[in-house]
Image: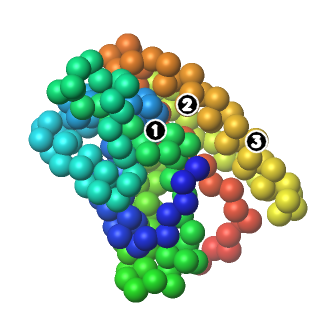
Amino acid sequence: MAMYDDPRILRAIAHPVRNRVLHELEAAGALRAADIARLLDVPANQASFHLRQLAKYGLVEEDPDAARDRRDRVWRLADPDGIRFRTADMLAQPGGRAAYSVFQRNTVARGRHLVERALAVDGSESTGRSVSEWSLRMSVEEAQELMEELAEVVERRRDAGRAHGPGDGRETYSVFQLIQPYPEDD
């Protein structure tokens, strides 16, 4: 998994469309700009713009092996295992705290949106949506072990999903994991 510490990358992926592009590429493995445009319901030129922005920071790259011909541009994550940040290194750089603040605000908003949609009662309860919450007594080491076990399950499902192309009746699901000591109420 690629590690990044450039604050400009946080600003780039804080944008909701670019963030969603990354999620779609993570789920699918490789997609054309037209596929992304259809999935996100945005114009193809807008999808292409956001792909180029992500490529500028080394987060996505063209996948020539997946292209039908030389004119066909297929994109994939630069690292198929995803993106991680060295937060401490990023915060120490000029502009790091501001970039992290933007990223944090957008991530919290996205997390809230995901939970609200999963809990919505709108007649679409059969879509496989779920919100689960458990309370476990663990040591820090046991929490780390749980995170690793869950990551293995998710990666196995992700890899299986990548074997299918767009338009096969599958859609991208968000798996939003949060493991932390029980927070104090503010």
Please give the residue where the numbered disc 3 appears in the rendered image: 149
SS at badge 2: helix
CA separation in Å, label 1 and label 3: 19 Å
Query: Residue 56's spot in the image, x, y percent?
Result: 29, 57
Query: Residue 77's spot in the image, x, y percent?
Result: 42, 42
- Local crowd size for mark 1, using a 10 Å CA cut-off: few (<14), some (14–19), many (≥20): many
Q: Residue at x 83, y 63 (%)?
A: 140
Q: Amino acid at mark 3?
A: Glu
Please give the residue where the numbered disc 1 appears in the rendered image: 26
Q: Residue at x 32, y 38 (%)?
A: 62
| Closer-to-camera residue (56/27) | 56
Of discs 1 and 3, which sits in the foreground?
1
| Closer-to-camera residue (130/149) | 149
Q: Earlier in the sequence, mark 2 or mark 1?
A: 1
Query: Residue 63's spot in the image, x, y percent?
Result: 36, 33
Q: Residue at x 50, y 80 (%)?
A: 91
Up-down: is 130 above or below 57? above
Please give the residue where the numbered disc 2 appears in the rendered image: 158
SS at badge 1: helix
SS at badge 3: helix
Query: Residue 17's spot in the image, x, y percent?
Result: 27, 49
